[in-house]
Image (cartoon, rainbow, N blue to C red):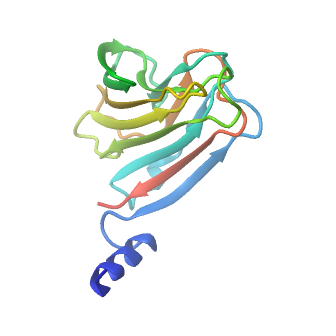
Amino acid sequence: MSLMLLGILNQQAAGGGAGAFDLLETVSLATSASSVTFSGLDAYTDYKHLQIRAVARNTTTYDESVNLRLNADSGSNYAYHSLRGSSASVTSSAASSQTSARISAFTGTDQGVNIYAFLVLDILDYANSSKNSTMRVFTGRGKSSGMEDVKLNSGLWMNTSAVTTIEIFPNSGNINTGSRFSLYGIKG
């Protein structure tokens, strides 16, 4: 590896330069919770995009869909697309005029205690108040039976307000103890 490449990687790891990821906040659940919320996002003026990385489980017996709301908006202002690969099958879905954006599914308690779903969620241009907010999501989960799945999702919040609050919550049950959510800022 060249010294120039090593220098670039070191600069980005230290929070320098455009495109660098800086850890802003982490929520680790010591008890189960109905949702995880990041608020006061308008204080992060140095960043162009936000990213949430999570490992999580749900308290329901079976896997449960997970949703996102921005700025506590529960109106029918969300749309999403989903592409899912599981074993040898591929499925897709889409919805509009929703009260939240479906972003993932978290592993249920029927799986082993050490099996978590992962989530990488990008909210692009979150502070831009001249366009609707968009998001892209990459998720996956393993199963004790060995069957895994992976999803690529996209979401749209049909509102031009700058994003100041992100809430993540399951359709039913709670987000289980031991789940962790980390919020990163991405410089432009």
Identify the image quadrant of residue 58. top right
- Above or below residue 52? Residue 166 is above
Q: Establish if 10 lies above or below 74.
A: below
Q: Quadrant of residue 179?
A: top right
Q: Where's residue 73, x and y in %?
A: 44, 23
In the picture, measured across the screen, residue 72 lies left or right of residue 150, that is right
Give the residue at x 32% y 12%. Answer: 97
Which image quarter is the C terminus in? bottom left
Horizontal placement of 166 versus 162: left or right? Answer: right
Q: Residue furthest bottom?
A: 3
- Give the percent coordinates (x, y) of residue 18: 30, 67
Question: Is 13 above or below relative to 100?
Answer: below
Q: Nearer the viewer, residue 164 or 105?
A: 105
Q: Nearer the viewer, residue 146 or 177?
A: 146
Rendered location of residue 25, percent (x, y): 57, 53
Quadrant, the N terminus? bottom left
Q: Who's the residue at 29% across and 35% down the image?
A: 134
